[in-house]
Image (tube, helix red, strand yellow):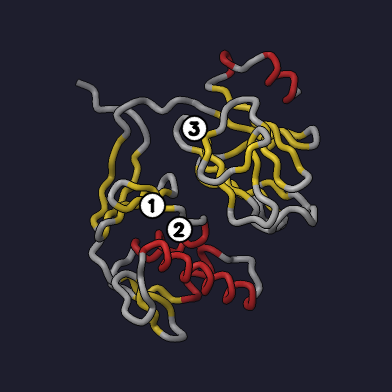
Amino acid sequence: MAPPSGPALTVVRFGAFEADLATGELRRKGVRISLQEQPFQVMALLVERPGELVTREQIRQRIWPRAVFVDFEHGLNKAVSKLRRALGDSAQNPRFVETLARRGYRFLASVDRRETTSARPRRAASFRLIWEGKAVPLADGASVIGRDPEATVWVDAASVSRRHARIQVGVDEAIVEDLGSKNGTFVNGRRVERPTALSDGDEIRVGVAVLLVRAFIDASTQTHGAKRELE
């Protein structure tokens, strides 16, 4: 019998938590916990080397390579705070993330890492956003929409937050969630209160920008309308 096809995925477990490093998802006892991209990246870096010091400079090079020092310091401190909140951890009495003053952080819990192979073949799902007449392909993983010039979809408008919303693309689905934006994220006119699955033809509104979702499995299954939008 041939082995099951599909990509190898790394899943790590610690305490009551499970993190899928391929999809950027964190769960506690099977329940998904909302965790933004940068705090998740910090966690992923720490669990690579449990029990070891990960310096602030190592974190900067991996996650904030182009940030100025002040922005990096603020971003890292904020990311660690959000990570601790998601894990129910405490800086004063840490169970997971320990701070080594002025040096970096250490992950305290035991980490169980396993490589898994998907039991089904990966479907060639593709997702794009159509905005201002342009098609923006969404790669697997997280894509951020916002006013930050480094966002995947940069919308330079005062009504849009720097990191307004995030689209997480998985094997055959795309999910959008609001990132605590000031003016909210809407799908087909309805405010996004929790991670929401996207379908072909959905409209995402962030501030003044309206983005059209195009989704298809392969070239033979694209709708005529989708082809027309992308030409």
Quarter of the figure with the N terminus: top left
- Dot 3 or dot 1: first in sequence order is 1
Left or right of residue 141: residue 53: left
Looking at the picture, tell me which residue is in the foreground, 139 or 212. 212
User: Residue 54: horizontal and vertical position, in percent?
Assistant: 40, 73
Q: Circle 1 is placed at which residue position?
A: 26
> Which residue appears at 50% of the width and 67% of the height?
79
- Is disc 1 in contact with disc 2, using a CB cutoff of under 8 Å? yes
At label 2, the amino acid type is: Phe
Real-space CA distance between mark 1 and mark 2, rounded to the nearest whole angstrom: 8 Å
Name the mark on residue 120.
none
- The residue tagged 2 is 40
**Residue picked out by circle 3:** 173
Q: What residue lies at 65% left-to-right and 41% top-to-bottom?
A: 186
Where is residue 138 shown, x and y percent of the image?
Answer: 60, 38
Instruction: Measure the alpha-carbon separation of dots 3 and 1.
Output: 17 Å
- As helix, strand or loop, the secondary structure at mark 1 comes to strand
